[in-house]
Image: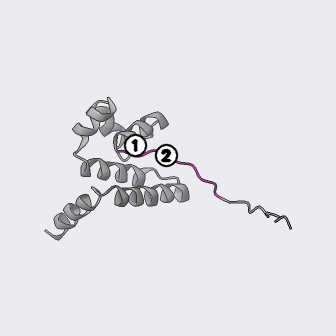
Amino acid sequence: MAQTDFRKYHIEKLQDPEEAIVYLEIALREYEKDGDTEAFLLALRDVAESQGGMTKLSQKTNLSRTSIYKTLSSHSNPKINTICAILKGLGFRIRLEPIFIKRRVIKRRT
């Protein structure tokens, strides 16, 4: 029973776009560490569920429900365009940032 309560709470929290972003970013960082897409795909499934499920996502993305389920399955190797379509349907996009930031020294005029 407690597991069901946590799952319900988790999905409700993900209805907040800021909570969903943090969740997806953490899952993506984990992917960067170990190359395992499973956690990121699970995060996408959870966010999709929080926003009305796969049927609603299918309507927003023009992807079939079957295609979305296959794409987000734990053993999938999805294409970037499919992931981008799903993210867009959920109201998000991929954003790039540098891993290392070179600091520039700015000389002030005197």
| In magenta segment, residue 34 | no
Query: Mark 2 touching mark 1, by CB under 8 A?
Result: yes
Residue kind at label 1, given as amino acid type: Leu
Q: Which residues are magenta?
A: 91-99
Image quarter of the N terminus: bottom left
SS type, badge 2: loop
Magenta stretch: dominant secondary structure: loop
| In magenta segment, residue 92 | yes
Residue 87: image x %, image y %?
40, 43
> 9 or 33: which is nearer to us?
9
Q: Residue at x 37, y 59 (%)?
A: 18
Q: Residue at x 22, y 62 (%)?
A: 7
> 50 or 104: which is nearer to us?
104
Looking at the image, is mark 2 or mark 1 earlier in the sequence?
A: 1
Whether residue 61 is situated above or below residue 106 in the rendered picture: above
> 104 or 49: which is nearer to us?
104
Is the residue marked by circle 1 packed among few (<14), some (14-19), or many (20+) residues within 10 Å?
Answer: some
How far is mark 2 from mark 1, CA to CA? Answer: 8 Å
How are the residues colored?
one colour
Q: Residue at x 29, y 30 (%)?
A: 64
Q: Residue at x 22, y 37 (%)?
A: 55
Residue 16: image x %, image y %?
30, 58
Residue kind at label 2, given as amino acid type: Ile
Residue 94 shows which numbered tag? 2
Considering every residue shown, the one lying at the far bottom of the view is 2
Residue 87 shows which numbered tag? 1
Residue 59: image x %, image y %?
26, 32
Q: Residue 11 appears in which quarter of the rendering? A: bottom left
Whether residue 71 is situated above or below residue 31 in the rendered picture: above
SS type, badge 1: helix
